Amino acid sequence: MKAIRGKIAGEGCTVAMTLTAPPAADSVPEPLFSRGEVIVQAGVLLASVVDGVRFDQLDDTEVVAVMAALEGVGRKVDGASVRR
């Protein structure tokens, strides 16, 4: 998977970001916390990033990259919610 590069502007600052593919499933260490706690933490982190996105300050390429990344996260969440 290709890395997605972009900037997120918010509250008087611009934060550079690089999104890359996650490591292979067999190379991810077991979390120190329960999976539920890790998912809650990930949600808090995601919310803090998404809340800082100002789409009117992004060029079209950045908007598409952010929307594609959000769509990917949404698909993971949807898939997990229907799996048992």
Image (spheres, rainbow, N blue to C red):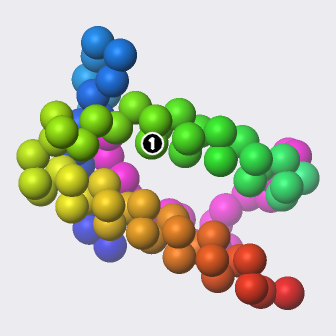
Tell me if residue 28 is in the magenta stretch.
yes
Percent x, y of residue 47:
56, 41
Using a 10 Å C-alpha cutoff, classify the residue at mark 1 as few (fewer than 14 neighbours), some (14 to 19) or many (20 or more): few
Name the side, left or right, on which 49 lies relative to 59: right
* Relative height, residue 57 to residue 29 (above, below): above
Q: Residue at x 67, y 74 (%)?
A: 26
Say what amino acid the circle numbered 1 marks: Val
Percent x, y of residue 41:
72, 42
Residue sticking out furthest to the right: 34
Q: Residue at x 29, y 16 (%)?
A: 13
SS class of the residue under badge 1? Answer: helix
Percent x, y of residue 39:
74, 53
Q: Residue at x 32, y 46 (%)?
A: 18
Name the side, left or right, on which 30 lies relative to 58: right
Query: 72 or 21: nearer the eye?
Result: 72
* Relative height, residue 24 to residue 56 (above, below): below
Name the side, left or right, on which 48 lies relative to 1: right
Rendered-image quadrant of the N terminus: bottom left
Labels in figure, total = 1
Q: Residue at x 34, y 38 (%)?
A: 53
Q: Which residue in the protein does label 1 denote?
A: 50
Tell me if residue 4 is in the magenta stretch.
no
Magenta residues: mostly which secondary structure? loop
* Relative height, residue 63 to residue 56 (above, below): below
Residue sticking out furthest to the front: 56
What span is in magenta?
Answer: 17-33
Percent x, y of residue 78:
63, 77
Query: 31 or 36: nearer the eye?
Result: 36
Give residue 84's quadrant in the image.
Answer: bottom right
